Amino acid sequence: MARILLGVSGGIAAYKALELVRLATGAGHAVRVVQTEASQRFVGAASFAGLTGAPVLTSEWERDPARGAYPDQAPPDHEPLSHLQLVANADAYVVAPASANTIARLAHGLADNLLTSAALAATCPVLVAPAMNNHMWEHAATQANVATLAARGVTLVPPTAGRLGSKGEWGMGRLAEPAVLLEAIEAALARDAALPTAGPWDGLRVLVTAGGTREPIDAVRFVGNRSSGRMGFALAHAAADRGADVIVVAANVGLPRDPRASYVDVETAAQLEAACQDAFPACDVLLMAAAVADFRPANPADDKLKKSGRAELVVTMEPTADVLTGLAQVRRPDQLLVGFAAETGSGAVAYGREKLARKGLDAIVVNDVAGEGIGFDTAENEVTIITRDGEHHVPRSSKSDVARAILSLVDRMRRATTAGA
Ligand code: CTP
């Protein structure tokens, strides 16, 4: 199942887009539709809204009641910009039918309506299915525009020859049949998913922190937490799969190690901070999965504390440094920082968003550790990845799958930054 954004531009073939939506939703995909104003002269928004079960937008100035969410998603608790959020959430963006005018706009990078603005912001696969009169299709301008789009990596679903929209006209320019369009979309999705890396991570330096810190009370006791290091190690493994140079700062992790990564073992928050400060300047991506103590015993005893003669033991705790915030303060603009937030309860996502801003991060991975079978010391996780302009829910799956989903998003963010630079 995928999330598909469908851009409908003006032309008689717009009626076939309804059938495409019916087929796509029937196949289990979640679909949102944006229309140009001209397309609404051919097919009304109510039909698309009815078939998708989601609002249809035409203008970037219009409020989206679903706030960029697809029918399978919960809307975020803020109002993102539609042209960014609809494509950020999409696995594929298909413009069908694409009129000669819309193709020209796309080829020239115009962003003068929601459909074209969203296309400029799309980092997912983009498909364009032209439909027009044969003379318009054969015109040198249209052919040049189509060639430009293809050269940029847009997948063209070519028109076919036959009876055209206007009475008595025959020739090349019919929109591909809806079933063919869906096949092309699914093929593009499969190609995208099969890419281990859309941009290979060869040479990319990734710093991962994993595990949980332990803060000594005395020579044998400590204050710790339940983090096993599984999520951090899964991230290190997935990053090595993509070809990255991986350094793992491991806080008390007893799991098997990936021979492709290098490891720095630490116990306490202060040691983790020192190790991160060493490695951070040379890294491109920081994945801060470790559960770092916020407080530590202020005066740990050098020897083992004796219980004899004590009615109680009072341990005074002092705050530790927030490692991630410290690193964010000295970051370079080309570095990408991902934090993790273990939260419990209903305000988890809102609190995560607040943490993203407070700590100066590019993304924060929020998981509700109160959920049964997910979170600490379990094989599975279910997370919401919050970025500055959106939210991506990763349903309950293995920590390896969650790690891959996190890296895909990091990859998209990196490509968006590089493209915008
Ligand atoms: N973190 C850190 N240094 C600390 C505490 C946390 O670098 N001393 C990092 C964690 O590795 C994680 C992120 O900050 O990536 C969020 O950690 P969390 O404990 O959820 O956040 P806190 O700032 O401690 O917020 P609170 O305890 O109030 O939820």
Image: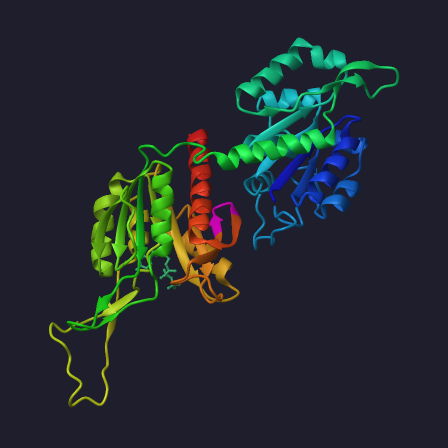
**In the visual, does 113 lie left or right of 259?**
right
Q: Quadrant of the N terminus?
A: top right
Q: Is residue 266 left or right of residue 23?
A: left
Q: Position of residue 93 (x, y in %)?
A: 61, 34
| Residue 379, above or below 334 | below
Q: Quadrant of the C terminus?
A: top left
* Ligand 1 in which quarter: bottom left
Question: Taking 131 as reference, is 308 above or below it?
Answer: below
Name the residue located 39 percent from the left edge and 63 percent from the top edge: 376
Left or right of 312 on screen, residue 291: right
All told, the count of numbered labels is 0
The segment highlighted magenta reads 385-390
**Is residue 39 in sight in this rendering?**
yes
Q: Is residue 387 magenta?
A: yes
The answer to whether any part of residue 113 appears in the image is no
Quarter of the view holding residue 125: top right
Q: Position of residue 181 (x, y in %)?
A: 68, 30
Which residue does the image show at 38% across and 63% down from the upper left? 377
Q: Residue furthest left?
A: 303
- Up the image or down, 165 lies above or below 400; here it is above
> Quarter-wise, where is residue 2 in the image?
top right
Q: Nearer the viewer, residue 307 or 391?
A: 307
